Amino acid sequence: MSVETSTTQEAKCLGCGFTAPAGSDEWNRPSHPPLGTITQCPECGSTDVHTQ
């Protein structure tokens, strides 16, 4: 019996629920001078994004 496990983590926007693989091109990556590059939801613009 074989069990497949996914090594790709999902990231979820806590603002609207959008999900996509963490680090994928589906997420916006604006530059924020004090913080560097941040992850931003392409659907609602929120930066409150967490990996699951």
Image: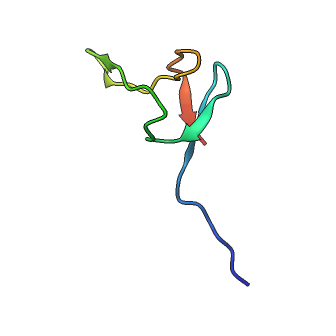
Percent position of residue 22, x then y: 49, 42
Tell me if residue 49 comes above or below residue 2 in the rendering. above
Task: Pick the quarter of the image with the C terminus.
Answer: top right
Tell me if residue 18 comes above or below residue 34 in the rendering. below
Task: Pick the quarter of the image with the N terminus.
Answer: bottom right
Percent position of residue 9, x then y: 55, 49
**49 or 21, which lies in front?**
21
Task: Please identify the residue farthest to the bottom as the structure is shown.
Answer: 1
Res 1 visible: yes
Q: Is residue 30 left or right of residue 2?
A: left
**What residue appears at the point 43 percent right and 25 percent down from the top-left corner?**
28
Q: Is residue 19 left or right of residue 29?
A: right
**Quarter of the view holding residue 6:** bottom right
**What residue appears at the point 50 percent right and 20 percent down from the top-left corner?**
47
**What residue appears at the point 49 percent right and 34 percent down from the top-left corner?**
26
Percent position of residue 37, x then y: 32, 26
Tell me if residue 39 comes above or below residue 21 in the rendering. above
Q: Is residue 42 left or right of residue 38?
A: right
**Quarter of the view holding residue 44:** top right
